[in-house]
Image (cartoon, rainbow, N blue to C red):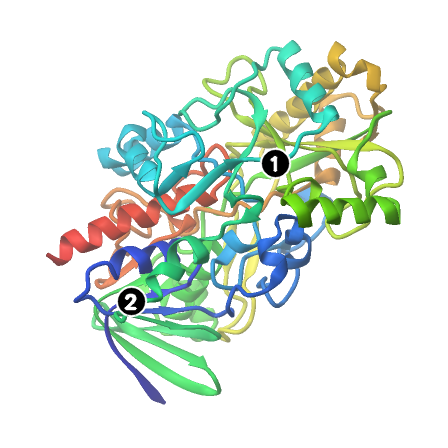
């Protein structure tokens, strides 16, 4: 086994959080940092063309190729569970939507952790610090940071009509989803620069890679953390046909994501004791919360046939595809600059909700499922998800082999509350589509179909059309001292093990009310500041 040397900090995972951490920590020139990434460089063309997510998801070059266990709530279906395996992590293959979540999310975390620094008013400056907002600096937005936020470079008549129909249904037109209360309907803002995807590798890691105090090792698979006498001393990993060890003088920072982070902790002897013993792994710290509390947003994809121009028909002909390609080549605009979803809306499933608990992702296209051809008829898709699911799943190792995929069990629609919200969400979508603004397009429900009427029928239909929107979180959640399910404290430190922090979406006690990428980026900003302050 070869030694990769000693470093002040070892970062595991060059995804969203890892790239930010590497940038922020190496600004201090005397700090030596090692960044280990299992994937390769982000030099694949389709990473950078926005519509290229179609070729990055479920591609072994850029995706871990995880799948869920068969899920009873989805009629026994198993879903693909994309996670980025490349520099930039999931920011290299995701939907590029810039979304912070809502004030309620962060104020709730402050209550759950007993740490006031997690309140919305306290984390807002961290979002602004890294932001480069197209509209310039303001009370809500930052300018000049690395994380560019732009308007989308397209519009569709059918999406404009849906927005007007939502307005007619009581969901107001708004310009910005990132002010703390997201209620309303608007086109999403995206992390792009002039129609090209901006991932965290380009935004944060590329500038840091020029610093002599940062070592980046790609194509390296971390097998386990080295835990001795209650402290994380470093890591063991393989890469380039060699087995390596690396020592962390100060801390090891685990930023491998909501699936791989709990998996690596369990492989290293940190996790539920019974699970570890079953797989012959010596228990270094019995932590029952590791891998539990999995939460995700399940999107219910309703499809409506319309008499209007949609991408289904535009992309159906050779001439149409050529025109789309030429438009992007000349102007970096049009369908090839599209995020997977273009129009968004936040609403309440019923008036009793204190704040919006539904999010829409609306697209001028339709297909049976991801990776399959577009339908031959003009249609749009209105996907709606429950932002605050009550179901909880888990991520657990399947064996002691670090190369074996873990078992991912989301338990979608497994609670009466989630089934009720699903039925209410489908009914709300029908009310929007029935509004006057859409009637000239003669919308006709294709999926799930008008035969589904009762709440129970709609809940069953939700299980048939539901699929993940790729927001897994919560598997190493934060909590107060003495909370038996908490894996980390409010400063990202792993409970019971010194010299180790978790800094990624797995720390969320409850899922944010919206897309999860930019909150994860904010975590890294917060953690880097804490780490450097502690080191002084």
- Secondary structure at badge 2 equals loop
- Residue furthest to the left: 536
> In the figure, residue 461 lies in which quadrant?
top right
Q: Nearer the viewer, residue 215 or 156?
A: 156
Residue occupying the point 34% across, 26% down = 138
Query: Which circle marks residue 462 in the picture?
Result: none
Residue occupying the point 83% across, 22% down = 443
How crowded pointer 1 is (Cα within 10 Å; few <14, some 14-19, many 20+) is rated as many
Q: Position of residue 182 (x, y in %)?
A: 48, 23
Q: Nearer the viewer, residue 262 or 270?
A: 262
- Residue furthest to the front: 330
Is residue 317 positioned above or below 37 on the image?
above
Query: Which circle marks residue 153 in the picture?
Result: 1
Q: Is residue 242 visible?
A: yes
Q: Position of residue 130 (x, y in %)?
A: 34, 43
Residue occupying the point 23% across, 33% down = 116
Is residue 66 positioned above or below 5 on the image?
above
Counting residues from the start of the chain, the first of labels 1 and 2 encountered is: 1
How crowded pointer 2 is (Cα within 10 Å; few <14, some 14-19, many 20+) is rated as few
Residue occupying the point 76% across, 10% down = 436
- Secondary structure at badge 1 equals loop
Q: To which residue does mark 2 refer?
A: 211
Q: Position of residue 132 (x, y in %)?
A: 39, 39
Q: Nearer the viewer, residue 158 or 192?
A: 192
| Distance between mark 1 and mark 2 Cα atoms | 34 Å
Is residue 114 shown left or right of residue 205? left
Is residue 232 positioned above or below 73 on the image?
below
Q: Is residue 288 visible?
A: no
Count up the numbered dots.
2
* Screen quadrant of the N terminus: bottom left
């Amino acid at each position: 086994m070869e030694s990769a040397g000693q470093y002040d900090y070892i970062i595991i995972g060059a995804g969203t959080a890892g790239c930010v951490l590497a940038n922020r920590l190496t600004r201090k020139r005397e700090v030596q940092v090692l960044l280990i990434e299992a994937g390769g460089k982000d030099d694949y063309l389709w990473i950078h063309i926005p519509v290229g997510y179609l070729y990055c998801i479920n591609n072994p070059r850029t995706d871990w190729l995880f799948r869920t266990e068969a899920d009873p709530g989805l009629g026994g279906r198993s879903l693909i569970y994309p996670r980025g395996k490349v520099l930039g992590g999931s920011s290299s293959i995701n939907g590029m939507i810039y979304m912070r979540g809502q004030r309620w999310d962060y104020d709730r975390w402050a209550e759950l952790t007993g740490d006031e620094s997690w309140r919305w008013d306290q984390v807002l400056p961290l979002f602004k610090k890294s932001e480069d907002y197209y509209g310039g600096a303001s009370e809500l937005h930052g300018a000049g940071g690395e994380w560019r936020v732009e308007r989308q470079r397209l519009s569709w008549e059918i999406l404009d009509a849906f927005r007007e129909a939502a307005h007619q249904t009581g969901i107001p037109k708004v310009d910005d989803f990132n002010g703390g209360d997201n209620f309303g309907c608007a086109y999403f803002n995206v992390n792009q620069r002039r129609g090209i995807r901006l991932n965290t590798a380009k935004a944060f890691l590329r500038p840091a890679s020029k610093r002599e105090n940062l070592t980046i090792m790609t194509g390296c698979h971390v097998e386990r953390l080295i835990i001795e006498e209650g402290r994380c001393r470093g890591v063991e990993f393989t890469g380039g046909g060699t087995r390596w060890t690396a020592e962390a003088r100060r801390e090891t920072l685990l930023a491998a994501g909501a699936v791989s982070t709990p998996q690596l902790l369990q492989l290293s002897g940190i996790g539920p004791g019974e699970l570890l013993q079953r797989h012959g792994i010596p228990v270094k710290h019995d932590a029952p919360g590791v891998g539990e509390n999995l939460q995700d947003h399940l999107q219910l994809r309703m499809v409506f046939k319309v008499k209007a121009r949609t991408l289904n028909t535009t992309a159906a002909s050779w001439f149409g595809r050529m025109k789309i390609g030429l438009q992007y080549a000349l102007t970096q605009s049009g369908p090839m600059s599209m995020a997977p979803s273009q129009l968004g809306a936040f609403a309440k499933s019923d008036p009793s909700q204190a704040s919006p608990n539904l999010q829409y992702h609306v697209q001028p296209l339709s297909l049976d499922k991801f990776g399959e051809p577009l339908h031959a008829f003009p249609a749009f898709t209105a996907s709606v998800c429950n932002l605050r699911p009550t179901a909880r799943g888990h991520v657990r190792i399947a064996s002691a082999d670090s190369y074996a995929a873990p078992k991912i069990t989301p338990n979608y629609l497994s609670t009466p509350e989630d089934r009720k919200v699903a039925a209410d969400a489908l009914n709300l979508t029908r009310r929007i589509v029935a509004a006057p603004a859409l009637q000239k397009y003669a919308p006709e429900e294709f999926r799930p179909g008008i035969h589904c009427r009762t709440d129970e029928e709609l809940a069953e239909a939700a299980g048939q059309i539901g699929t993940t929107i790729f927001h897994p979180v919560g598997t190493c959640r934060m909590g107060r001292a003495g909370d038996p399910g908490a894996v980390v404290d409010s400063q990202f430190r792993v409970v019971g093990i010194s010299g180790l922090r978790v800094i990624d979406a797995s720390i969320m006690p409850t899922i944010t009310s919206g897309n999860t990428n930019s909150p994860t980026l904010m975590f890294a900003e917060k953690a880097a500041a804490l780490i450097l302050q502690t080191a002084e």
